[in-house]
Image (cartoon, grey):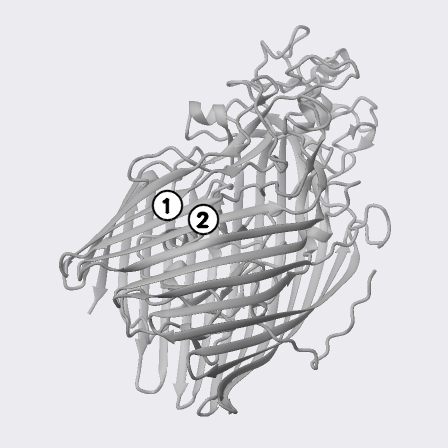
């Protein structure tokens, strides 16, 4: 284990601060933003070296934060790989914040200064963020070190409402397509003793537009504030209890036959979360502010996933043997075939699965893990994390320059307990999975290739991160600003395998890992006038491997996330270096524009790579990747009634190292058609799921005080399918069906509201106005189904005895046209 030097408070570097978006419609408005997650002294647009976007979350039509960002923030796209709107992947500049384990995480998210990326895999659960309680969203581009670990492509800073910004009481009800029902209550108050308070309760149900995909979201958020002269204090509580069904991707031909169909069920996620957060600040004197934060989060989650057991697809699963028929008869079963069962007359086989589950444990022929076509995986996760931040910020003079300085320290600790079990079963005609008495416990599941089938996991992980950070901005006459800042992080990850406790044994997940790095940044801006500003910046960010990744990093013992983990060779931390360059300004005091280019280079990217064992994989460091692009925006007012916003983004996300990875469902793999083989990735190959072009348009019309209409459009270009990392896949119509990419698409949405009378407002929205059929992402994978039948061994054996499989392209389908209406009442 490589030793990392201990954290030193004397170790500070220089780096970049951040830039807010320019106000679109008012030339005398200066948008400000805090340069760190914990507010102190704010910076304005002329001081920041990046195209930060900031918006007020006053859109009552968006059901969750991901949907709001997809409509309002340039460069942001949403991909529904989980098949549930509350479990979307959110991508910006080719970096992702996702609830899905195994996705390379590259965006950090903060709610009132608390990091919302979870200790277990850095994943992000959007359903735990109370969107209705949000006041503003700020998107910080680049690998800004002041926002801590995992800020590789950007950071989201979310600010909640309080009693001063949201006084009064309002009640809103909403209903519409797919059985959606929503009840939202908000109340805020402020008094002359310095107290203010805000509370929000949200009950949301959606039956889901796809088969067996309902969601129930229950959220509460409350905040109590106190202000006395120069002292401010806020205590908030956030609570959520959610039940989400998301049935993921579907193979292309089956999706074309039935747009609402699902591949397998169930796919259930249940989460219960509680967060307490206290922030306080005191203005020691004018221009000198001291602030602090203490937070605590607790979260419990459970998952149940029904899948095809891909280990059975190259096996004989149809006709029970004489011994299997005997054990079935002994246990009272009848109706099993005595001979002749095959794929043509048995579309959903299950007799061999039942028989193998009934065979004695010591039977050498007991192989339910090879004869059962279905797999049920259940997992439980308990997470707790807590921490504090101390920060001081002040203004001063240094020669001819005015300076703004921030210094601080932070400590974050977390503890994770993850348990998992697998149960074998068989797939039914409705694509559900029925379990049998065979588990991945090394006993009842029998053998796979002569080895006991054991997938059980009981892992405990602890993480401790200590940080110190500093930033200084020099401002001179003539609009020149220079900002330097840096953050030193030291992270310790401790894993304890509660099934195999001894570190160093082949099967143990136990281990100690230490990571430390100083991330610097520097930014220069020049603003000769309010009509023209320019920026140039360089910044570095890093991400330490998580408990999940370290527990699944051995190519000799691959995992099926979240189904299993293996012993853990150490991974290196990811380091991102970003360069920004751009201009921004205003035209005729009514239109704001921005032009920028960036390049972000990742070293030691952590990727989840499929292994030679179908459906399994492991985490590994991947040489170098690069994301570079062009960002254009224009917004403003055409008249008092009409306003608009336009965003265009061009992105080139490519691998920059030669690597060999598994390409089991890729037609160009080294093993041959339908078999499990490798593919060679070369520099210049496009990274999957990163579209190269994106265009967004928003138009708002407010003809009078009663009516307001909005039309928005998101157009997204083609992206490479996951599994096609070498960009070489092509369908042959026999072993492989479906393209190696996801086609581009464009979606229009219409919204409106009408003030019926003082206090009463009617709202409505039509998503996917033109009822376009589109998909947001694609993945290459084995396809177990041919029409309405599960087919094992779809082709004859090769001379070496191997059986090729049928593979397809699986897509994340977009929702059809959906209509919702709501009524809001503001109590007087």
Disc 2 designates what residue? 77
Q: Nearer the viewer, residue 334 or 442?
A: 442
Return the disc, 2 or 1, that comes first in the chain's sequence: 2
Residue at numbered disc 1: 714
Q: Residue 316 occupies which quadrant of the picture?
A: top right
Residue located 32% across and 37% down the image: 817
Can residue 31 be seen in the rendering of this structure? Answer: yes
The residue located at (58%, 26%) in the rendering is 730
Mark 1 closeness class: few <14, some 14–19, many ≥20 residues within 10 Å: many
Rendered position, 96 above or below 825: above
| Quadrant of residue 257 within the rendered picture | top left
Q: In the displayed structure, would residue 786 be above or below residue 617?
A: above
Image coordinates for residue 821, horizontal then vertical, percent: 25, 47
Q: Is 72 situated left or right of 679 in this image? A: left
Q: Is residue 252 left or right of residue 14?
A: left
Looking at the image, which residue is at 19% across and 70% down? 828
């Amino acid at each position: 284990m490589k030793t990392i030097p201990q954290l030193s408070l004397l170790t500070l570097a220089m780096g970049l601060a951040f830039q807010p978006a320019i106000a679109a419609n008012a030339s005398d408005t200066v948008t400000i933003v805090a340069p760190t997650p914990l507010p102190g002294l704010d910076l304005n647009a002329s001081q920041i070296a990046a195209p930060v976007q900031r918006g007020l979350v006053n859109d009552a039509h968006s059901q969750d934060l991901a949907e709001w960002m997809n409509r309002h923030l340039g460069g942001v796209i949403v991909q529904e790989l989980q098949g549930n709107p509350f479990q979307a992947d959110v991508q910006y500049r080719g970096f992702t914040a996702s609830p899905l384990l195994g996705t390379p995480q590259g965006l950090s998210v903060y709610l009132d200064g608390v990091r919302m990326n979870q200790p277990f895999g850095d994943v992000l659960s959007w359903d735990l963020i109370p969107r209705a309680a949000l006041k503003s969203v700020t998107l910080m581009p680049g690998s800004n070190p002041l926002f801590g670990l995992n800020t590789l492509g950007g950071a989201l800073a979310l600010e909640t409402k309080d009693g001063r910004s949201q006084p009064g009481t309002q009640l809103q009800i909403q209903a519409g397509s797919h059985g959606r029902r929503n009840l939202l209550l908000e109340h805020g108050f402020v008094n002359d003793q310095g107290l203010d308070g805000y509370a929000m309760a949200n009950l949301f149900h959606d039956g889901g537009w796809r088969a067996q995909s309902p969601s129930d979201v229950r959220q509460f958020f409350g905040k109590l504030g106190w202000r006395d002269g120069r002292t401010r204090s806020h205590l908030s509580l956030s609570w959520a209890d959610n039940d989400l069904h998301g049935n993921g991707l579907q193979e292309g031909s089956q999706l074309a036959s039935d747009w609402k169909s699902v591949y397998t069920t169930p796919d259930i996620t249940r989460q219960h979360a509680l967060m307490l957060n206290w922030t306080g600040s005191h203005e020691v004197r004018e221009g000198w502010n001291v602030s602090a934060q203490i937070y605590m989060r607790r979260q419990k989650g459970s998952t149940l996933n029904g899948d095809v057991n891909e280990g059975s697809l190259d096996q004989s699963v149809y006709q029970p043997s004489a011994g299997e028929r005997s054990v079935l008869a002994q246990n009272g079963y009848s109706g099993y075939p005595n001979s002749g069962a095959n794929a043509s007359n048995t579309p959903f086989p299950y007799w061999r699965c039942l028989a193998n589950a009934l065979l004695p444990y010591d039977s050498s022929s007991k192989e339910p893990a090879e004869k059962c076509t279905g797999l049920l995986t259940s997992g439980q996760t308990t997470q707790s994390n807590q921490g504090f931040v101390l920060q001081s910020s002040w203004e001063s003079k240094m020669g001819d320059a005015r300076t703004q300085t921030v210094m601080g320290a932070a400590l974050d600790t977390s503890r994770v307990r993850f348990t998992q079990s697998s149960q074998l079963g068989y797939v039914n005609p409705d694509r559900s999975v029925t379990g049998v008495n065979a588990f991945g416990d090394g006993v009842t599941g029998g053998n796979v290739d002569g080895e006991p089938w054991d997938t059980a996991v009981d892992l405990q992980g602890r993480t401790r991160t200590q940080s110190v950070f500093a930033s200084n901005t020099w401002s001179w006459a003539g609009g020149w600003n220079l900002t330097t800042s840096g953050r030193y992080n030291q992270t310790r990850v401790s894993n304890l395998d509660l099934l195999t406790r001894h570190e160093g044994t082949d099967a143990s997940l136990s281990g100690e890992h230490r990571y430390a790095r100083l991330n610097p940044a520097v930014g220069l801006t020049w603003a000769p006038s309010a009509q023209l500003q320019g920026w140039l910046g360089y910044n570095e960010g890093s991400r330490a491997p998580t408990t999940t990744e370290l527990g699944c990093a051995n190519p000799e013992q691959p995992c099926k996330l979240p189904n299993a983990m293996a012993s853990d060779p150490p991974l290196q931390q990811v380091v991102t270096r970003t360069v920004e360059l751009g201009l921004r300004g205003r035209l005729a005091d009514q239109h704001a524009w921005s032009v920028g280019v960036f390049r972000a280079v990742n070293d030691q990217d952590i990727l989840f790579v499929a292994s030679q064992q179908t459906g399994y994989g492991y985490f590994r460091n991947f040489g170098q990747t690069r994301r570079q692009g062009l960002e254009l925006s224009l917004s403003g007012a055409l008249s008092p009634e009409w306003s608009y916003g336009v965003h265009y983004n061009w992105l080139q996300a490519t691998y920059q190292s030669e690597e060999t990875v598994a390409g089991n469902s890729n037609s160009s793999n080294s093993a041959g058609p339908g078999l499990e083989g490798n593919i060679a990735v070369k520099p210049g190959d496009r990274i999957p799921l990163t579209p190269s072009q994106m265009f967004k348009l928003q138009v708002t019309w407010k003809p009078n005080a009663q009516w307001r209409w909005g039309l928005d459009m998101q157009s997204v270009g083609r992206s490479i399918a996951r599994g096609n990392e070498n960009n070489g896949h092509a369908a042959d119509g026999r072993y492989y069906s479906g393209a190696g990419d996801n086609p581009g698409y464009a979606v229009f949405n219409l919204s409106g509201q009408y003030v019926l009378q003082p206090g009463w407002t009617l709202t409505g929205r039509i998503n996917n106005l033109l009822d376009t059929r589109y998909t947001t992402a694609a993945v290459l994978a084995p396809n177990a189904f041919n029409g309405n039948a599960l087919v094992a061994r779809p082709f004859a054996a090769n001379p070496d005895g191997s059986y090729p499989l049928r593979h397809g392209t699986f897509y994340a389908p977009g929702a059809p046209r959906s209509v919702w209406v709501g009524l809001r009442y503001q109590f007087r």
